[in-house]
Amino acid sequence: MKLFLIDNEKEYYYDNLFDIIINDKNIYKVAILKQEECYGLFYKILHSLFYEYPISVLDFTLAEGYSSSNVNNAIEKSKNIKSRFSAFDEFIKQLINRTINWEVTLLTSGTTGRPKEITHNINSITRNCRVNDKHYDDIWALAYNPAHIAGIQVFFQALMNQNTIVNVFGSFSKLFSYLYEKYNINRISATPTYYKTLLSFNDNVYYRIKSVACGGEKSSEAIFNLLKRRFPNAKIFNIYASTEAGTLFQSEDDKFIVPDSYMPFIKISENSELCIHKTILAKSDSFNIQDDWYYTGDLVERLSGNSFKFIGRVNSFINVGGYKVNPEYIEEIINKIEFVNECRVYGVKNSVIGNIVCADIIIKPNSELSLDKAKNSIQQYLKSVLNKYEVPRVINIVSEIKMTITSKKARI
Amino acid sequence: MADIQEKLLKIVNEVLIEEGKKAVEIYNCELKLREDLEFDSLMLAVLTVKIENDFNIDIFEDGLVYTLGDVLAKVVNNEVISN
């Protein structure tokens, strides 16, 4: 019997997930630790898949909540619904064949603006899921917010292969290492910010991990080098995905190659914005589509042939007196400073020049520099390598970096 | 008032020194930020942030600040209103 879902810390077992759905106790077992949220959400997704009705993440957060009492309400509601699946295996088979009639409405992460509602069907959300014998022994660390697309994609990848998922979202340092050892985690997918935060808490090398996926934000050579050092036996992937289109490209470094099959659906606009053809998008009323193309807001640099590199987000650029400053570029420069562990660059409204560039910086624990000296030295260095308007004018030495609920760096 | 002036002198000098310019010894209210102290718009932006952090007022909100005296007046008026 496999464990299916493990939520972190306090351990208790719940063995009636599929029992409730299909009245067969022995098919699957669910372990839930601490956060009922993740369990409740994934339960609801499973339930809606099994009974083939559409769901919305908004219903969980605003109306029903994720908790077990609300799960019970969902069970009550479903008593009159009949599923066409008589057994769990049949259900999984149809799921793998994408023949389940189901939709989920999600919210975009809203890193720099208001979240948008996006509706995916089974095909679009599982586009990149792989089902084969190689994945039989996978044990996943779920490091994304379970209510956002990346978390749900990990859920589907694991469900289709009937793998265990351990919820490590928001778990760093000792707790992650504990869960890694206890449940033999061997696959992880997370944002670069999650990895940097996790790996800055300790010097552990995670030998068992065989696959590391990095997505949701711009990756850099530095982050790849860090991942290679700390996950030495892992294949490292960079994933380009969005809530609007699901997973699109994958690479093994910070350059993406557009597969030939995707070429008709991808273009780069005159101002270097990546555009996706409407035919491969999820459904939404909030898309800004111009001449059948969706402008992703992601700025890219075309390299040779079909390859490109992600530069930053259009609306995360900071307007400083009419000059556009790319916070991710500044972060890359700051992160190269020997005694800097991690940083976040963002804009703050300013009555004189529109916005002022600010930086929160974490200094390496073994650095012998005083805070004032560190600050001064960073500012002097940045003045020597950046344009005047790009230099962060306010530098705060901090102990942690502000993240959004999807483990990405907050830009506002 | 003397206390506020002293704090403002410290802030103005911080901005000047950060830009590699010479600090001023006394808070002369006649000194013009742009012409005499050679503040550019980025330096003015930093000045507003630092003053806002310490005194909770955006001195450039209505744009009428030319001299160190104007800066002092804005901060003092705000302190009076706040108290």
Image: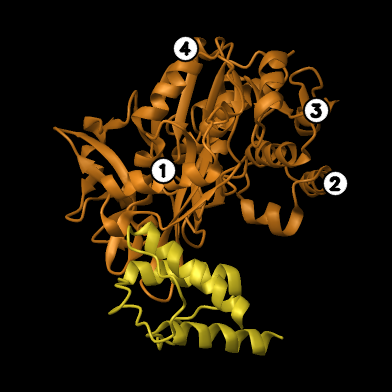
Chain colours: A orange, B yellow
Amino acid under disc 4: Pro
Q: Is residue A148 left or right of residue A315?
A: right
Question: Alpha carbon of mark 1 to alpha carbon of mark 2: how far?
Answer: 55 Å
Disc 3 and disc 4: Cα gap in Å?
40 Å
Name the residue beneath numbered marker 2. A69
Q: Chain of mark 3?
A: A
Q: Is residue B49 visible?
A: no
Which label lies toward us, 2 or 4? 4
Q: Residues within 10 Å of mark 2 (few under 14, many from 20)?
A: few
Q: Is the residue A170 above or below the residue B50 in the image?
A: above
- Say what amino acid the circle numbered 2 marks: Ser
- Asked which secondary structure carries label 3, the reply is helix
Secondary structure at badge 4 equals loop
Coordinates of residue A357 in the picture (x, y in percent): 40, 58
Disc 1 and disc 2 on one polypeptide chain: yes
Residue A13 x/y as whole percent: 84, 25
Q: Mark 1 sits on what residue? A: A377
Residue at 39% in and 22% down: A225
